[in-house]
Image (cartoon, rainbow, N blue to C red):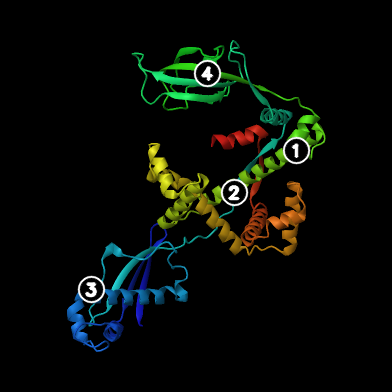
């Protein structure tokens, strides 16, 4: 088939392809298709395989032409896109070529057949700029205060929770069960504001109206109407600058009976610990590993953000939509439901799937661009790893997770898991080479808690 083409790049990493099939090929293609239909179709009054072309054309007319036109276009597109000079202009798997303006071309066997389609292609990216990149890595350490918080958390997880006496008041760190409802200026209950058996730890601030201080001293069975005025700059937009009247009833007060910090507690946590000192050493090791991983993550994130900024490129809309769709499906899996059911759940909460997806676009674009840049650099720098390097990674994982090397290998025996590990080691190797070409400086000092508090806030 004789086909000429013209490819034009358009915005958002899409292209416009105009192709022309020579009239000789149009005529022969039409003739061959009619012969094929004549041979296989069965029409009353004619023997199978002996239906005249004129009868076919008269009976099926435009629908037959449209079908043959579609076949000719498909054949031409496959021929064009498979050509070597089109390797950078092939459509993404999830971006089917669509006719410009949705105009389907008309077939005329005496004329060339010209059609124009638009589709998304993989972004064309060229990393030119590494100069000027400066990365500041926070200086963090695990302090005694961080260790004490973790030990306190372990005590709380292993605590016995018991009821306080009926006359005992609510105190800080008590586990309190309350009923609450919001009242209007006339004292009537505001519909939909009622909540029964709400449980929270006093002093944690983990309640809607921030009433920790207001219920201190209340006793079981007591009801109190609290009037609170919230600051104009309150983080909760529903409360900022408003005055709320809340009726609260204390239904239950419990206290955690914390176990002593001793060898017995350590042995209760895990039989591998013989003494409290063993537990403390393991906590310190785990926290330092988590700190190092977080610092490495922040370092890599800063580098990629600057690479994206210095080497801008557009993403195709279909790529963003496909990634958001994947994220939506993963979210459904996390909630142990179907994507359709998740959409109903989101709608019931007053939002919509479309709104959530639109809110994700910024993060999705950032993640996709970072991934594309990493893949490009891995390819351009020909980053590869050896079996020995994988063995070293097995040893490192075993050491960090208190496992044997054989246990680690067993974990990665699945082909996909092994491929994931190989990709991870390749990326580590890539970043090691990149950090030799950019400026890495010490950032502000932070404690372990501050390091992860920043993540929680974001």
Of tags 4 and 1, the one toward the viewer is 4
Q: Distance between the residues labelled 4 and 2?
A: 53 Å
| Frontmost residue, 350 versus 322 | 350
Q: Residues within 10 Å of mark 2 (few under 14, many from 20)?
A: many
First in residue order: circle 1 vs circle 3: 3
The reply to whether dot 4 and dot 3 touch (C-beta < 8 Å) is no
Q: How crowded is mark 1: few (under 14 residues within 10 Å), some or many (20 or more)?
A: few
Instruction: Identify the residue shown where x is 50% and y is 50%.
Output: 330
Is 204 displayed left or right of 339 in the figure? right
Is 77 displayed left or right of 169 in the figure? left
Q: Distance between the residues labelled 2 and 1?
A: 40 Å
Q: Is residue 386 above or below residue 210?
A: below
From this viewpoint, is residue 379 visible?
yes
The numbered disc on residue 63 is 3
Q: Residues within 10 Å of mark 4 (few under 14, many from 20)?
A: some
User: Which residue bears the numbered disc 2?
Assistant: 303
Residue 9: x %, y % from top left: 39, 64
The numbered disc on residue 371 is none
Of tags 4 and 2, the one toward the viewer is 4
The reply to whether dot 4 and dot 1 touch (C-beta < 8 Å) is no
Q: Residues within 10 Å of mark 3 (few under 14, many from 20)?
A: few
Q: Distance between the residues labelled 1 and 3?
A: 74 Å
């Amino acid at each position: 088939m004789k086909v000429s083409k013209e490819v034009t790049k358009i915005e958002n990493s899409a292209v416009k392809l105009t192709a022309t099939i020579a009239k000789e090929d149009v005529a022969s293609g039409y003739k061959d298709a009619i012969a094929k239909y004549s041979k296989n179709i069965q029409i009353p009054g004619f023997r199978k395989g002996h239906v005249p072309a004129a009868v076919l054309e008269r009976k099926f007319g435009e629908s037959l032409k449209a079908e043959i036109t579609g076949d000719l276009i498909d054949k031409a597109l496959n021929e064009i896109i498979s050509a070597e000079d089109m390797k950078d202009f092939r459509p993404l798997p999830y971006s089917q070529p669509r006719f410009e303006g949705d105009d389907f071309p008309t077939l005329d066997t005496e004329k060339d057949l010209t059609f124009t389609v638009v589709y998304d292609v993989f972004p064309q990216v060229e990393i030119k700029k590494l100069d000027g990149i400066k990365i500041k890595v926070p200086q963090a350490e695990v302090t005694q205060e961080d260790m004490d918080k973790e030990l306190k958390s372990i005590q709380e997880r292993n605590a016995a929770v018991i009821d306080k006496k009926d006359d005992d008041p609510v105190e800080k760190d008590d586990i309190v069960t309350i009923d609450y409802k919001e009242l209007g200026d006339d004292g009537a209950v505001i519909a939909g504001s009622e909540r029964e058996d709400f449980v929270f730890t006093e002093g944690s601030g983990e309640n809607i109206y921030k009433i920790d201080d207001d219920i201190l001293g209340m006793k079981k069975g007591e009801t109190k109407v609290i009037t609170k005025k919230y600051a104009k700059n309150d983080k909760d937009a529903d409360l900022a600058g408003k005055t709320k009247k809340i009726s609260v009833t204390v239904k239950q007060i419990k206290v955690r009976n914390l176990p002593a910090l001793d060898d017995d507690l350590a042995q209760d946590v895990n039989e591998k610990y013989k003494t409290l000192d063993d537990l403390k050493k393991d906590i310190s090791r785990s926290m330092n590993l988590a700190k190092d991983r977080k610092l490495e993550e922040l370092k890599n994130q800063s580098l990629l953000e600057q690479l994206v900024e210095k080497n801008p490129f557009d993403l195709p809309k279909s790529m963003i939509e496909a990634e958001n769709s994947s994220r939506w499906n993963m979210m459904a899996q996390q909630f142990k439901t179907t994507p359709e059911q998740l959409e109903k759940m989101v709608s019931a909460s007053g939002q919509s799937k479309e709104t959530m997806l639109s809110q994700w676009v910024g993060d999705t674009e950032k993640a996709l661009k970072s991934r594309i840049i990493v893949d490009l650099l891995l390819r351009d720098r020909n980053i590869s790893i050896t079996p020995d390097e994988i063995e070293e990674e097995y040893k490192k994982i075993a050491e960090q997770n208190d496992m044997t090397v054989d246990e680690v290998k067993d974990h990665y025996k699945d082909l996909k898991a092994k491929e994931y590990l190989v990709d991870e080691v390749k990326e580590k190797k890539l970043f090691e080479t990149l950090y030799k070409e950019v400026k890495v400086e010490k950032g502000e000092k932070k404690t372990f808690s501050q390091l992860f508090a920043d993540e929680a806030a974001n």
